[in-house]
Image (cartoon, rainbow, N blue to C red):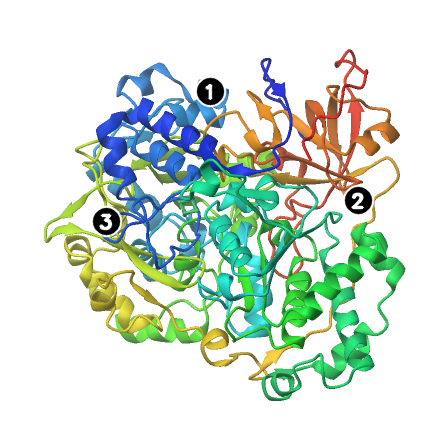
């Protein structure tokens, strides 16, 4: 049993959940910390540069930029991310003497991040409990010596976080493959791998099939397993565009989320002094993991409508010309068990019928989703059912329609395009062979979970991370940390401290890097990088402010120097030239990666360029049948034993991935604390628990002992009946490594069976007024 100590927040306050999002509070909550921490001049400069043509791309989520840019083109969370990175506060040299690793391990993520920007490389020698400053030269020597001493290149793993820009990512995968391995785990393994797997197989592309302005052209947008108000707030403006153009929005989620109820757009008068825009016309409060059943039931209803009025419902031309598998699907879905659908979804027949009617009466439908779907056990099958439903009525490859996965981290999609994947397709590898003149290794490498398992077995000895917080982000925190401690060397390329810096291998290095906000000057002059957003638009990112430290290196420089130290002149790759002038990297990308022809010219155009997208542009599907594949998926859902709840992990509003900006979650009414579990009041009644009571949360697994998160405060909240929610990453301890989505190996963090046990003397049992504002 894992028995992690739990942070207790004595000042926690639980209020009401909000019935709307953004508006004036968002402006105050983003600008106040920025002004306090960075001052007026720096805040003004950064505000005017974020997401602007000659400015920098927001390093937070992957939401695209609209064509019609405002002077201020960012959201509350974007500004928080900028403040987090561009803070002038730096970690002093004395910090490393004053803080042992043992002491740092007792600090939470929030405290670690608050210490400021890292400005010099530090090294933890074997056997020491302290980092100490080290020169860049020696740091690269250490990396090279340890990598070159390995028996096989496969004994190293090279992680990438989604902040990494295209140029860095391309160079990094070149280094790793020239070193000789495909061990390239990334954060996508932990979030949208299920999307890539499902869409890659059925549509031939693992990315969105829509353009930004498709939202305002859609008759209907279905938002599934997603909380845009917190995780990609400017998406609310796109949903508002849809509504104001006469479209409808349906939210399908276990929790009501403020942004999907009503949006107060801070760029509009109606959002500042008016009531804003109501977003969801319909809210289906689905049981966690019930989405696949809802989608299948809707497809069945579509087929029944066609049977009742032949030739009027399905897009027969599209189905005949562009799809395969329709007959098999029809035969299978006809047998769908309605009772199983009701059990899986927790919805009524009336709600399901109303949802189906909305789909049937809309000509152009977008279905958009995020991790509420991708981190389910049946995530891949669920996303295939989204594709099925869209295909039946030709909702792919026409304006205002399509499949729209929304990625959570700025360039996570671009990193994949650049080759950060443990199993890149043959044609990419062939292009690499041809361009660089060495045989790129072909065997599949480790993904994120396999990397932890490799560390556990002792097969992975060196772990290098290009940003991110690997042990914080992955499931089964305790196992991941124990595994990481078994490494001989861990290396973190980073801007700020996090948990992964203090859970080290025998030796460890922290290599501090420039942030996106900072001006990057190399020998050939000021440089820029590029990123790809959630709708496949690629644009440039130029730093805006002076770096916080004179010794900082760019990520490109770090990769180039690490590669040069490790590989020398192996294969004649000119690492110095790449560092000197990033145009030289883009020239190579242009010759290897499809869609990047003439990269150095098109990236300099206003707004960048859009990558080709077969399904969107030409209804072209690069699948094994050469058509969009309608697939058959067996319905299966998580059974909830009596007295148990289905727990999902989720972010708070003041959080980006594992970065905690504050201890508040404004939209859910939580301040100054994170040790909460949100439970439906009817479930509390049945379980004999009360709002405010302290409980231990036990997760239950078939083949292994229970896991526990202790002393959490129960919050009575309008979650779907039978479902509960707690904050990530703290609740990761409840999810074992083995609990992963089928086919994609993504941690199944939205499908955790838990029981709640009262803590002795753990709080009141009286029932206060239910704290929700719906
Ligand atoms: S929506 Fe996402 S990318 Fe845009 S400003 Fe907000 S956090 Fe940044």
Residue at 62% from the left image edge and 22% from the top image edge: 6
C-alpha separation, residue under disc 3 versus residue under disc 1: 38 Å
User: Can residue 127 be seen in the rendering of this structure?
Assistant: no
Q: Quadrant of residue 401?
A: bottom right
State the image coordinates of residue 347 (x, y, percent, origin top left). Answer: 81, 52
C-alpha separation, residue under disc 3 versus residue under disc 2: 51 Å
* Mark 3 CB near ligand 1 (8 Å cut): no
Mark 2, residue position: 702
Query: Position of 724 compared to 260: left or right?
Result: right
Mark 3, residue position: 542
**Which residue is nearer to you in this view: 578 or 769?**
769
Mark 1, residue position: 102
Mark 1 closeness class: few <14, some 14–19, many ≥20 residues within 10 Å: few
Query: Which of labels 3 and 1 is toward the front?
Result: 3
Residue at 30% from the left image edge and 37% from the top image edge: 511
Question: What SS does tag 2 mark?
Answer: loop
State the image coordinates of residue 331 (x, y, percent, origin top left). Answer: 81, 79
Query: Position of 382 compared to 112: left or right?
Result: right
Quadrant including the C terminus: top right
State the image coordinates of residue 499 (x, y, percent, origin top left). Answer: 47, 31
Residue projecting furthest to the left: 524
Mark 3 closeness class: few <14, some 14–19, many ≥20 residues within 10 Å: many
Counting every numbered tag in the picture gives: 3
Question: What SS does tag 1 mark?
Answer: helix
């Amino acid at each position: 049993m894992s028995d992690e100590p739990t942070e207790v927040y004595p000042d926690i306050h639980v209020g009401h959940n909000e019935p709307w999002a953004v508006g004036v509070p968002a402006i105050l909550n983003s600008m106040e910390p920025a002004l306090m921490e960075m001052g007026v001049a720096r805040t003004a400069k950064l505000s005017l540069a974020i997401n602007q043509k000659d400015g920098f791309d927001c390093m937070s989520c992957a939401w695209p930029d609209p064509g019609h840019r405002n002077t201020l083109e960012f959201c509350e969370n974007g500004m928080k991310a900028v403040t987090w990175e561009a803070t002038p506060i730096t970690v002093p040299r004395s910090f490393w003497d004053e803080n042992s690793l043992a002491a740092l391990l007792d600090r939470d993520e929030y405290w670690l991040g608050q210490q400021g920007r890292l400005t010099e490389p530090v090294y933890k020698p074997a056997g020491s409990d302290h980092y100490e400053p080290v020169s860049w030269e020696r740091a690269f020597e250490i990396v090279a010596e340890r990598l070159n001493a390995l028996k096989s290149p496969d004994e190293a793993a090279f992680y990438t976080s989604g902040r990494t820009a295209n140029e860095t990512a391309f160079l990094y995968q070149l280094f790793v493959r020239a070193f000789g391995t495909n061990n390239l785990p990334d954060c996508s393994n932990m979030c949208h791998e299920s999307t890539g797997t499902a869409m890659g197989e059925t549509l031939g592309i693992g990315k969105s099939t829509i353009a930004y302005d498709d939202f305002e052209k859609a008759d209907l947008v279905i938002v599934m397993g997603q909380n845009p108000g917190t995780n990609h707030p400017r998406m609310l403006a796109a949903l508002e565009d849809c509504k104001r153009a006469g479209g409808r929005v349906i939210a399908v989620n276990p929790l009501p989320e403020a942004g999907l109820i009503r949006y107060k757009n801070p760029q509009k008068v109606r959002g500042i002094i008016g009531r804003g825009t109501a977003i969801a016309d319909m809210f289906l409060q689905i049981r966690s993991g019930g989405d696949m059943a809802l989608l299948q039931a809707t497809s069945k209803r579509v087929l029944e409508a066609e049977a009742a009025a032949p030739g009027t419902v399905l897009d027969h031309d599209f189905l005949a010309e562009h799809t395969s598998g329709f007959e098999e699907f029809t035969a299978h879905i006809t047998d769908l068990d309605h009772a199983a659908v009701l059990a899986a979804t927790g919805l009524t027949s009336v709600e399901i019928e109303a949802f189906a009617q909305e789909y049937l009466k809309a000509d152009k439908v977008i279905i958009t989703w995020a991790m509420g779907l991708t981190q389910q056990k049946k995530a891949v099958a669920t996303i295939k059912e989204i594709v099925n439903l869209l295909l039946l009525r030709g909702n792919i490859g026409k304006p205002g329609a399509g499949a729209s996965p929304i990625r959570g981290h700025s360039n996570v999609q671009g990193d994949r395009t650049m080759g950060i994947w443990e199993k890149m397709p043959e044609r990419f590898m062939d292009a690499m062979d041809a361009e660089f003149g060495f045989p790129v290794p072909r065997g599949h490498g480790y993904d994120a979970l396999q990397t932890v398992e490799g560390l556990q077995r002792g097969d992975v000895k060196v772990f290098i991370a290009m940003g991110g917080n690997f042990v914080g982000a992955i499931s089964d925190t305790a196992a991941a940390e124990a595994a990481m401690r078994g490494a001989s060397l861990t290396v973190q390329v980073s801007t700020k401290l996090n948990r992964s810096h203090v859970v080290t291998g025998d030796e460890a290095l922290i290599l501090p890097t420039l942030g996106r906000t900072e001006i990057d000057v190399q020998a050939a002059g000021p440089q820029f990088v590029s990123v790809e957003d959630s709708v496949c638009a690629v644009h440039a990112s130029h730093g805006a402010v002076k770096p916080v430290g004179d010794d900082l290196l760019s990520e490109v420089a770090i990769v180039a120097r690490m590669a040069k130290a490790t590989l020398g002149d192996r294969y004649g790759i000119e690492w110095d030239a790449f560092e000197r002038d990033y145009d030289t990297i883009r020239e190579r990308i242009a010759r290897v990666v499809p869609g990047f022809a003439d990269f150095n010219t098109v990236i300099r155009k206003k707004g960048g360029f859009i990558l080709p997208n077969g399904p969107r542009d030409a209804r072209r599907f690069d699948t094994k049948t050469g058509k969009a594949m309608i697939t058959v998926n067996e319905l299966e859902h998580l059974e909830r034993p009596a007295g148990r709840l289905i727990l999902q992990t989720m972010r708070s509003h003041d959080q980006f991935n594992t970065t905690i900006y504050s201890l508040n979650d404004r939209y859910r009414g939580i301040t100054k604390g994170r040790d909460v579990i949100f439970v439906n009041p009817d479930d509390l009644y049945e379980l004999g628990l009360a709002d405010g009571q302290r409980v231990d949360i036990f997760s239950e697994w078939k083949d292994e002992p229970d896991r526990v998160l202790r002393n959490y405060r129960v919050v009575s909240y309008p979650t779907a009946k039978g479902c509960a929610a707690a904050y990530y990453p703290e609740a990761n301890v409840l999810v074992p490594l083995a609990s992963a989505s089928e086919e994609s190996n993504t941690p199944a963090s939205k499908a955790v069976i838990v029981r709640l046990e009262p803590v002795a003397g753990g709080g009141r049992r009286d029932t206060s007024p239910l704290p929700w504002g719906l």
